[in-house]
Image (cartoon, coloured by chain):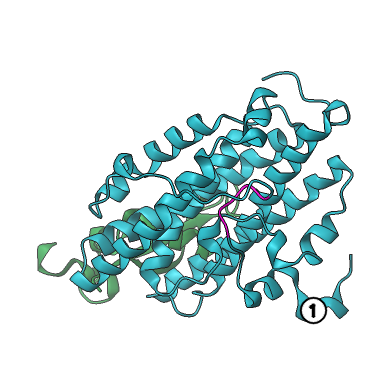
Amino acid sequence: MNEYVDVDAMSPVDRAALKRLIMGLADSKRLMGIRYSDWILGAPTIETGVATSSMTQDEWGHARLLYSMLKHLGEDPVVAEHDRPAEAYGNLSVLDEPAENWAALVSAMVIADGAMTVALAGFAGGRFEPATSRVAKMVSEEEFHVSMSTAWYRRLADASEEAQLLLRAATDRQLPVALAWLGTNDAAKEALAAAGVTSTAAEQVASFKDAVRGVLASGGVDVDAVAPAGEWDTDRGRGLGQPDADSIERARGDRNRALFVE
Amino acid sequence: MLEIVYDVFARKNRGDQLSHIGYIDALDDETAKVYAWTTYSEENWFEMCIVKRSSVIAVNLTEGIFAKARGDDA
């Protein structure tokens, strides 16, 4: 891609689709960061907790960069970050609730973080200039997350029966949702792919499956045999539902409003 | 949980001496790389590498952490 899209010349429909994409990615990053942060002090080892803290920072940094792209659409990123209700969040719905155990977080590392990275890579390779310059670095920073998630997934898949059951339950719950998030080819996704802003839904699903096929197989999961979840909210580009209230308070920074410096 | 000890070495700038900056416990080489990078993140390292402590060959001491790490297999 060597010619950037002129955002000002985009149709209202395409601009809305681009806004939905940015919000969905940014909200997913913010919620992923919260899910990581929940385990900084509860991870199996000190080193794992430190790594989880670092991944939290990565995700929140990525979220802020993504929210800032809204300025190119004439939107105020501060409003997007701090003043939206839960029902407006466009995050991957796997992240709506806290991970109930370490195995569920490990599964989310592979599936949710992995799906986000695929979506980001598609965005980085497209024709929206801010994404081409900023998102590639995000994708490279995710390499450490992949190393961490792959090692832990394989470890749990080879651990006790209880660990295996917890991992499998989380995977069975998360994988269809992630496949739908990447692969639901609604009008907004088609429009962005046609405009060259991002890769197609089919390409993203194929890339995601290639990325996770091996590691999920270690847990007995055949990614090619799993169907995407059926429920879809076209307005937000995600499954039905919304993040829990506590997470939204944290995502918006409700408790620190008096300290905002923006 | 069976973990492996890795020693961490790094240099701040090209041309600096590689220095031992600490150690981490990890499941395997891949997690060790992640843990080393995230645990010793106080500097913007030019280069970082890790070595399994059990691979270090003690030269002059028969006691101490490196000699002990090799055990009878040395």
Question: Residue at (36%, 53%) from the top-left corner?
Answer: A150
| Quadrant in the rendering for residue A167 | bottom left
- Was residue A22 drawn as part of the magenta stretch in this picture? no
| Quadrant in the rendering for residue A90 | bottom right
Q: Position of residue A223 (x, y in %)?
A: 32, 44
- Was residue A237 drawn as part of the magenta stretch in this picture? yes
Which structural element holds mark 1?
helix
Q: Position of residue A239 (x, y in %)?
A: 55, 53
Report whether residue A193 is seen. yes
Q: Position of residue A16 (x, y in %)?
A: 77, 40
Outermost top residue: A2
Question: Residue at (71%, 45%) from the top-left corner?
Answer: A20
Q: Position of residue A101 (x, y in %)?
A: 40, 74
Colour used to depict chain A in the structure image: cyan
Colour used to depict chain B in the structure image: green
Q: Is residue B51 left or right of residue A46?
A: left
Q: Which residues are magenta?
A: A236-240
Reply above or below: A225 against A244.
above
Q: Is residue B39 left or right of residue A212?
A: right
Q: Which residue is mark 1?
A: A256
